[in-house]
Amino acid sequence: IDCSAGDIELEDTLIKKVEFDNSAGNVELEKCQVQDLYAKVSAGDFEMTGTEDLAEYNVDLKASAGDIRFGNNKLEDSFQQSGKDGLKIVVRSSAGDITIQ
């Protein structure tokens, strides 16, 4: 899903595989079941809430200018975690926060 300017919002959605590329705006996922997600956000926030069993995911997060919150933890500019095969979340943010809870 490519978006030059504006927000991308999804709620209560099953996502098997998706790529988000958002130049200016936020990506917000609420109560979505995710299997394979890649998001690149140039100027805006990435927020994913209501996700169960975060410990099961392979996670790779990088924020050049912004904060990362994963679960209840506030982290530095990058975070990685190994999980189960087939469950992956990769987020790159140039200027914005990454929140996954």
Image (cartoon, rainbow, N blue to C red):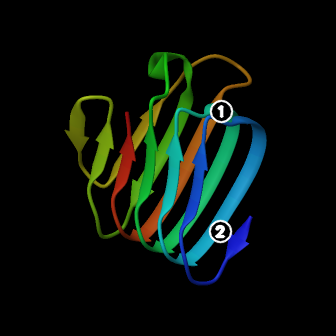
Residue 63's place in the image compared with 44, above or below, is above
Where 66 falls versus 94 (above or below)?
above
Closer to the chain start, of discs 1 and 2, is: 2
Q: CA distance from mark 1 to mark 2?
A: 17 Å
Relative side of 45 to 28, left or right:
left
| Rendered location of residue 9, percent (x, y) | 57, 56
Q: Which residue is mark 1?
A: 34
Q: Image quadrant of residue 73?
A: top left
Q: For the point 29% across and 43% down, which residue is it?
A: 69
Picture quarter with the C terminus: top left
Image side of residue 60 versus residue 17, left or right: left
Residue at which label 2 appears: 21
Q: Residue at x 47, y 22 (%)?
A: 54
**Pointer 2 local density, CA inside 10 Å: few below 14, some 14–19, many at least 20:** some
Q: Nearer the viewer, residue 6 or 57?
A: 6
Residue at image coords 31%, 49%:
68
Q: To which quarter of the image does residue 39 belong?
A: bottom right
Residue 94: x and y in percent read: 43, 72
Q: Amino acid at mark 2?
A: Asp
In the image, is residue 21 above or below residue 90?
A: below
